[in-house]
Image: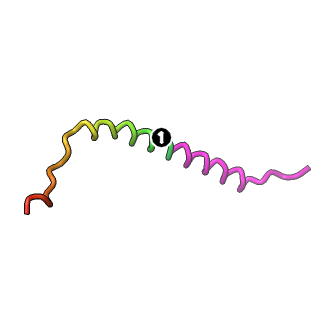
Amino acid sequence: MAKPNYAFAKRQRDIAKKKKKEEKRRRKAEARQPLAESAPPPADETKAD
C-alpha cells in the first residue's frame, strides 16, 4: 500500500483556498463597480490648460 503524500495534499488545499479567496475578492470588486459607475466622473484636469 502506498503511503499518503502529505505535501501534495497540503499544496492542493492551499491552491483551493487561494482560488476561493481570489474568487471572493473578484466578486466583491464587481459588487463595488456599479457604485463607482453611478457616481459622476471626476473633472478632467487636462482640459483646464
Q: Residue shown at 22%/38% (left/top)?
A: 39
Label 1 packing within 10 angstroms: few (<14), some (14-19), many (20+): few
User: In this image, 5 relative to 20: left or right?
Assistant: right
Q: Amino acid at mark 1?
A: Lys
Residue 29, quarter of picture: top left
Q: Which residue is situated farthest in the right direction here? A: 1
Q: Residue shown at 56%/47% (left/top)?
A: 19
28 vs 37, nearest the viewer:
37
Q: Position of residue 42 (x, y in %)?
A: 18, 48
Q: Which residues are magenta?
A: 1-21
Tell me, yes or no, whether the highlighted magenta stretch contains residue 20: yes
Q: Residue tagged by mark 1?
A: 24
Q: Position of residue 3 (x, y in %)?
A: 84, 52
Q: Residue shown at 7%/63% (left/top)?
A: 49
Circle 1 SS class: helix
User: In this image, 33 relative to 22: left or right?
Assistant: left
User: In this image, 7 relative to 26: left or right?
Assistant: right
Q: Which residue is situated farthest in the bottom direction here? A: 49
Q: Position of residue 22 (x, y in %)?
A: 50, 46
